[in-house]
Image: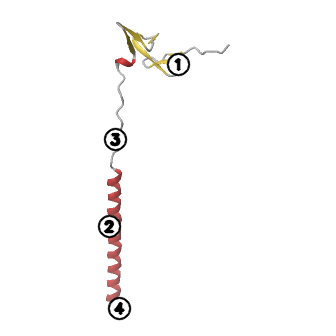
Amino acid sequence: MSEKVKKTEKVEKVEKVKEVEEEKVEEKKEEKKEKKKKVEKKKRKRKGFFSHYKIEGDSFKRLLPFCERCGIGYFMADHGNRYTCGHCGFTRYKPTETGE
């Protein structure tokens, strides 16, 4: 008789452990669902043609210089203290102002 009681107790313990494991699995699934929500990214403005030219009256004025190696059509990027060509890698430094 005592063996039957021990077996039933063991079975009950195993069932409780299974239930606890199932609950943990369900909690993890819920957490994953919460994490899957995507954050909307801000749309970046495209620069295009109008970032390279300025319209003054009836004419266009270039805001960025052309590359000296590549020629007309290849603009150089403005990096604060220098201009750099993205096509060939040519770098031209801006003149520094000395306070003399």
- Residue 86: image x %, image y %? 43, 20
Residue at position x 35%, y 28% from top?
45
Going from the N terminus, do you reach mark 4 or mark 1 first? 4
Q: Is residue 38 above or below residue 71?
A: below
Q: Is residue 61 above or below residue 33?
A: above
Query: Three-letter amino acid code at disc 4?
Result: Ser
Camera-side mark, 3 or 4? 3
- Residue 34: image x %, image y %? 34, 53
Query: Three-letter amino acid code at disc 2?
Result: Glu
Going from the N terminus, do you reach mark 4 or mark 2 first? 4
Q: Residues within 10 Å of mark 4 (few under 14, many from 20)?
A: few
Query: Three-letter amino acid code at disc 1?
Result: Arg
Distance CA(mark 4)–CA(mark 2): 30 Å
**In this view of the protein, which residue sits in the foreground, 100 or 46?**
100
Distance CA(mark 2)–CA(mark 3): 33 Å
Going from the N terminus, do you reach mark 3 or mark 4 first? 4
- Residue 60: image x %, image y %? 37, 9
- Residue 46: image x %, image y %? 35, 25
Q: Secondary structure at mark 3?
A: loop
Q: Are marks 2 and 1 in contact (CB under 8 Å)?
A: no
**Label 1 sits on residue:** 82
**Label 4 sits on residue:** 2
